């Protein structure tokens, strides 16, 4: 077992990740580190051995933690200093640890438009940028201006939209880079109009997705030719069960933990869906969910 460098933030050993995972599955992290500030995080990055695996997580809304947990250090930016939202006319600056929903609500209160689609995306701003999250025909790249990033040596730099390559559910930001904050562009509107749009989106999600279940959001990226849910449905997997995990009958691109599932049950369903869809359609599905751990 390795040792953590001396830092000011909160460090928890053998942290059970199951309660904070949206799937409510998975094992423990050797160390769970919550930085107290950017300076604290910077000091950690400078001191930590390069041989120690380091993982950055957001709200674990689109992540599957394997049953044997994560060897190394898991970092979560949950201190309030990483959750600020500063709304101005035409721009909003936000910490990477802020929830997408909170960002939308605060922009809405100030009559700033353009961020409403993020209300349909569970998780944090940092995660949304990293995966170029999207919904209702809009993606992060459409509103992105710049972000501050820290590398594994503690160096901080500002990266603009011209310097990042965004594609479908993907960006050129590396896994080992930590997004600290971002600036998005907005448009002027009224709080009432923005609220109505957000309510309509929320109602649409409620009727079309199993949002009240223990799930990790969309399991697979949509291929160019069609929707992932349709391919899974055509492969005969609607409602298919492995252990305590099931492919949702409401939306087949969602896997739910309906009966004390193990992460292995969910991963086995993911692999089965890939196999059956490939056999049935010749299309190879790509996971949108990130899988971490042993």
Image (cartoon, rainbow, N blue to C red):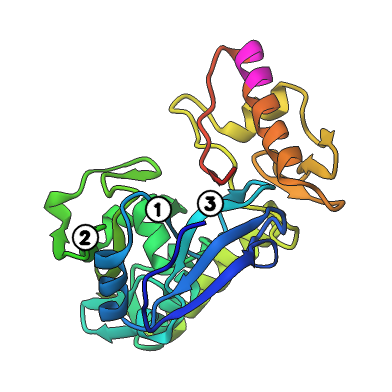
Q: Which residue is mark 3?
A: 71
Residue 11 placement (x, y as % from top left): 50, 75
Element at badge 3?
strand
Q: Residue 49, located in which quarter of the rendered image? A: bottom left
- Is 284 inside the magenta-drawn segment? no
* Horizontal relation, residue 220 to residue 271: left or right: left
Sequence-wise first label, 3 or 2 = 3
* Residue closer to the observer: 230 or 65: 65
Q: Residues within 10 Å of mark 2 (few under 14, many from 20)?
A: some
Q: Give the magenta range.
A: 275-280
Q: Is residue 136 above or below residue 20?
A: above
* Residue closer to the observer: 76 or 194: 76
Q: Is residue 228 visible?
A: yes
Question: Residue at point 25% right, 80% down?
Answer: 39
Question: Residue at point 41% right, 77% down?
Answer: 103
Q: Residues within 10 Å of mark 1 (few under 14, many from 20)?
A: some
Q: Is residue 255 above or below residue 199?
A: above
Residue 208 placement (x, y as % from top left): 68, 52
Q: Which residue is mark 1?
A: 52
Q: Disc 3 to disc 1, how far (Cα)?
A: 9 Å
Q: Is residue 204 above or below residue 119?
A: above
Q: Which residue is mark 2?
A: 153
């Amino acid at each position: 077992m390795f040792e953590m460098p001396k830092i000011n933030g909160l460090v928890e050993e053998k942290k059970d990740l199951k309660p904070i995972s949206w799937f409510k599955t998975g094992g423990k992290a050797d160390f769970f580190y919550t930085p107290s500030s950017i300076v604290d995080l910077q000091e950690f990055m400078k001191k930590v051995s390069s041989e120690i695996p380091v993982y950055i997580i957001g709200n674990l809304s689109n992540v599957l933690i394997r049953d044997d947990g994560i060897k190394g250090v898991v970092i979560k930016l949950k201190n309030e200093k990483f959750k600020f939202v500063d709304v101005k006319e035409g721009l909003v600056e936000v910490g990477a640890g802020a929830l997408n929903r909170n960002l939308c609500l605060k922009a809405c209160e100030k009559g700033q438009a353009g961020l409403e689609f993020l209300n349909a995306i569970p998780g944090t701003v940092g995660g949304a940028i990293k995966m170029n999250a999207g919904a209702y025909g809009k993606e992060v790249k459409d509103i992105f201006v710049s972000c501050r990033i820290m590398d594994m040596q503690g160096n901080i730099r500002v990266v603009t939209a011209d310097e990042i390559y965004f594609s479908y559910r993907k960006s050129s930001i590396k896994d080992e880079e930590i997004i600290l904050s971002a600036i998005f562009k907005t448009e002027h509107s009224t709080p009432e109009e923005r609220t109505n749009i957000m309510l309509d989106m929320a109602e649409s999600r409620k009727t079309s997705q199993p949002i009240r279940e223990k799930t990790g959001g969309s399991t697979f990226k949509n291929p160019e030719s069609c929707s992932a849910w349709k391919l899974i449905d055509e492969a005969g997997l609607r409602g298919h069960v492995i252990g305590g995990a099931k492919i949702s009958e409401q939306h087949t691109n969602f896997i739910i933990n309906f009966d004390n599932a193990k992460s292995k049950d969910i991963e086995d369903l993911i692999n089965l869906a890939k196999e059956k869809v490939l056999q049935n359609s010749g299309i190879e599905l790509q996971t949108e969910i990130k899988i971490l751990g042993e």
